[in-house]
Image (cartoon, grey):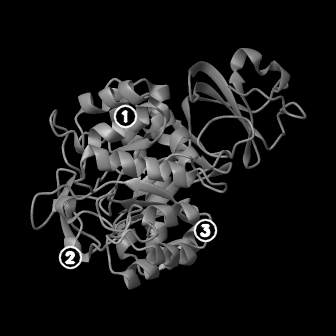
Amino acid sequence: MTTVPLTEPLTPQDPRLALRGRVVLPDAVLEDGVVVIAGDRLGWVGPWAQAGDVLAPGARVRTVHTILPGLVDLHCHGGGGASFPDATDAAQVLTAAHEHLRHGTTSLVASLVTADAATLLERTALLADAADAGELAGIHLEGPFLSAARCGAQDPRLMVPGDADLVRAVAETARGHLATMTVAPEVPGVLTARAANSAPECESAVGALAAVGAVPSFGHTDAPAELVEAGLAQAVEALASPGSRSARPTVTHLFNGMRPLHHRDPGPVAACLAAAARGAAVVELVADDVHLAPATVRSVFAMVGPGSVALVTDAMAAAGMPDGTYQLGPMAVRVAGGVARLADGDAIAGGTAHLLDVVRATVSAGVPLADAVRAAATTPAAVLGRPDLGALEAGRRADVLVVDAELRPVEVLRAGRPAGGSAGG
């Protein structure tokens, strides 16, 4: 908890704002706390009983139910009827980003799917414009260096070997906004390997990602546990260099899009859980009551802790929209009962939830509120290398989400400014 006194007490005419209510911190919940918003920063956060030094008599204090930090989603393909992999103009990008902003996601990483190089570069350039404008917190490429055997809702015909040159081209186009990229360790070129004639080691996609300031994320993989362990170790080593966003690689939607755990063939899941448990990886969970059972979510939190979990939506265009037919890159998707599946097949094709919905489902699964919020804000902010985001602490950006007793959005502030008001649940 950070309780740094403001330079001057808050007065009735002061443009600063104080919110009083249940305050969710990364490691605790203040049942009666205060969050002071000073311009675009959090000026003071602490218990109501200690607020006398910063709140002058008659100061503007608004009482609300529960105050969360703005949420941070590392993996989102769209929403509001718009899809990042299919966007062709800035308006479509903003439609998707603002759909999630209105529901409390104040920092959003836009995710692309497997496509040809020209399409990836074109979409990356469009998303980089939105990131330059502060509308996105980064860009994530889910492919194309993935396993066709675990393609999920992506087109296996467009998956290619790891290519360090393509990584650099995407990073250059992203202008510093390439945050993460999902890769499968068994795909040739993803990890460092020697040629058959024992020539010098070839450059790997994982190494290139770390060199350009992006975080490798392992997923859509059919690899055995030993290869995943080796890949995670290579990523940790590569990320140890100065300038890395994070010292830890991530795991793209653990369990989904990878070989299932079996006691005689543990595959990726066991290796990723072990790495997360020792603090060497962050595992994404799409804890939306569709991708994972509540007991699975509860068990992962118990095993690795909220500091090694990033709750994500994996949302596509249908988030916030009615059932129907949508597009996810080259793949047609049908949404029925709020569940997105490929129109040709039955594979789950992304999510339709907002990140606050995922937090609510995680809490319903039995995870403490502070842990769920930490996994949806503080931990993903750390993956992005953004210590100014992801927690209600003095000095951080004033990204604030006010929710009601059912954890539904009431008010959203980004950098201290209203972001569309109530989303109506």
Q: Quadrant of the N terminus?
A: top right
Front position in the image: 9 or 304: 304
Residue in the image at 54% along x and 60% along y: 210
Location of residue 220 by image quarter: bottom left
Q: Which residue is mark 2?
A: 157
Image position, residue 13 (x, y; %): 84, 39
Tell me the number on the disc at residue 68: none
Report whether 59 appears left or right of 146: right
Using a 10 Å C-alpha cutoff, classify the residue at mark 3 as few (fewer than 14 neighbours), some (14 to 19) or many (20 or more): some
Q: Which residue is mark 1?
A: 274
Q: Quadrant of the C terminus?
A: top left
Query: Compared with residue 350, is residue 156 higher up or lower down, i.e. above or below?
Result: below
Describe the element under mark 1 as helix, strand or loop.
helix
Q: Which residue is mark 3?
A: 176
The residues bearing labels 1 and 2 have C-alpha atoms spaced at a distance of 32 Å
User: Nearer the observer, disc 1 or disc 2?
Assistant: 1
Using a 10 Å C-alpha cutoff, classify the residue at mark 1 as few (fewer than 14 neighbours), some (14 to 19) or many (20 or more): some
Q: Earlier in the sequence, mark 2 or mark 3?
A: 2
The residues bearing labels 3 and 1 have C-alpha atoms spaced at a distance of 31 Å
Describe the element under mark 2 as helix, strand or loop.
helix
Q: Earlier in the sequence, mark 1 or mark 2?
A: 2
Query: Compared with residue 120, is residue 154 higher up or lower down, i.e. above or below?
Result: above
Observer able to see residue 185: yes
| Amino acid at the residue labelled 2 | Arg
Query: Compared with residue 102, is residue 369 higher up or lower down, i.e. above or below?
Result: above
Image position, residue 202 (x, y; %): 44, 70
Residue in the image at 67% along x and 45% along y: 398
Image position, residue 411 (x, y; %): 54, 43
Image position, residue 364 (x, y; %): 32, 28
